[in-house]
Amino acid sequence: MVRPEKENAVAYIAEKLSDSTGVYLADYKGLDVEEINDLRNQLREASVEFKVVKNTLARISVNKVGFEELLKYLDGPTAMAFCLADPIIGAKILSDFRKKNNKLDLKACIFDGQVYAEDRIKEIAKLPGKEQILAQTVGTIAGPLRNMVNVIHALLSATVNVLDQIKKQKEN
């Protein structure tokens, strides 16, 4: 690779490491082109970019952005999955793909600014996604508000009934 291409690759990886909400490192050894394309398509739909990287260029990028803890995982064939939106969805897709296809080995990840080993990826994959957490939060807030509206409605209905009864008594 010509030097400017290497510099561009290092800059690209460093930028993705800095800008991503989560990054997953995987050993893709044994996967054929069709399997990698299938994984890429699944990840792309979830705003996750799957990129095969050269370890030497990845090491330079990792040092550049300050994630030196990743250096020990940069051996053998390495691909990086850069999450541009919800990092939990990336973990779920990679873990599910690994269950179906034992050739993909998850090495490590950057989650919430920290570097974690492969065992943490399984724990992250079990977490609810951002959409699910938002839905649960809205449900938690909406429940008491709905109850309050029902109580106010019942009070107003009772008041209207009392006033209606008083009106009927006065008319008689």
Image (cartoon, rainbow, N blue to C red):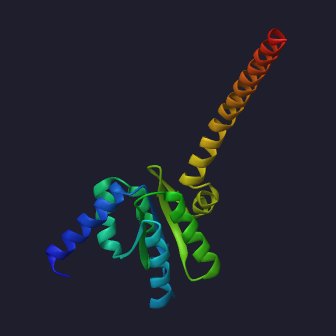
Q: Would you say 156 lies left or right of 70 here? A: right
Give the side of residue 151 with respect to residue 13, left or right. Answer: right
Q: Position of residue 125 (x, y in %)?
A: 60, 61
Considering depth in this image, is 115 or 90 the residue closer to the camera?
90
Location of residue 60 by image quarter: bottom left
User: Residue 134 placed where, x, y %?
Assistant: 56, 47
Tell me the quarter of the image containing the C terminus: top right
Q: Quadrant of the N terminus?
A: bottom left
Indicate whether 54 appears above or below 46: below
Question: What residue sits 74% from the left and 20% below the top?
Answer: 160
User: Residue at 50% of width from left, 86% of height from top?
Assistant: 35
Q: Nearer the viewer, residue 49 or 152?
A: 152
**Image quadrant in which you'd find residue 68:** bottom left
Q: In the picture provided, is 1 more to the left or to the right than 157?
A: left
Is residue 170 shown to the viewer in this render? yes
Vertically, is 121 above or below 4? Answer: above
Residue found 45% across the figure and 77% down from its top = 40
Q: Is residue 32 visible?
A: no
The outermost residue toward the front is 172
